Image: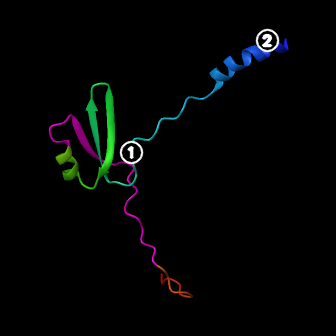
Amino acid sequence: MRSLILALLPAFLALAAPAPASAQKYDSTSPVCKTNYRWGGEDTDCGYTSIAQCQASASGLAAICINNPYYAGPPIDRGPRQPGRRPAY
């Protein structure tokens, strides 16, 4: 019985293992993304700062420019505070 369990264990583990997660296709650091459509699939590039910049890159291609739904916004400037001072509300 033990040898049967040991023989079937690798097959069971292969079935029970979760599928790998797919990567998120939107980067949160740029406000505009371009999706290129081609035979066999698509790819998304989120390295644009404006729709106009993206459209210039997409000109003549099967591509679309969209506002990045995952854009986090510009970084918050957290400069040094004066010690002992509280912000006035």
Q: Residue furthest left?
A: 60
In the image, what residue type sits under mark 1?
Tyr
Residue 86 falls left or right of residue 50:
right
Residue 60 falls left or right of residue 87:
left
Which residue is drawn at the image coordinates 38% and 55% (left, top)? Answer: 29
Q: Which mark is residue 26?
A: 1
Which residue is drawn at the image coordinates 48% and 81% (left, top)? Answer: 89
N-terminal of the pair, mark 1 or mark 2, is 2
Q: Is residue 70 magenta?
A: yes
In the image, what residue type sits under mark 2?
Leu
Q: Is residue 61 magenta?
A: yes
In the image, is residue 61 above or below residue 27?
A: above
Read off the magenta span.
Answer: 58-79
Which residue is drawn at the image coordinates 69% and 20% (left, top)? Answer: 10
Real-space CA distance between mark 1 and mark 2, rounded to the nearest whole angstrom? 47 Å
| Circles 1 and 2: CB atoms closer than 8 Å | no
Q: Nearer the viewer, mark 1 or mark 2?
A: 2
Q: Secondary structure at mark 1?
A: loop
Expressed as whole percent of the image width and height from the top left, the position of residue 11 reads 67, 17
Which residue is drawn at the image coordinates 50% and 82% (left, top)? Answer: 81
Q: Which mark is residue 4?
A: 2
Q: Secondary structure at mark 2?
A: helix
Q: Main secondary structure of the magenta part?
A: loop
Q: Residue furthest bottom?
A: 84
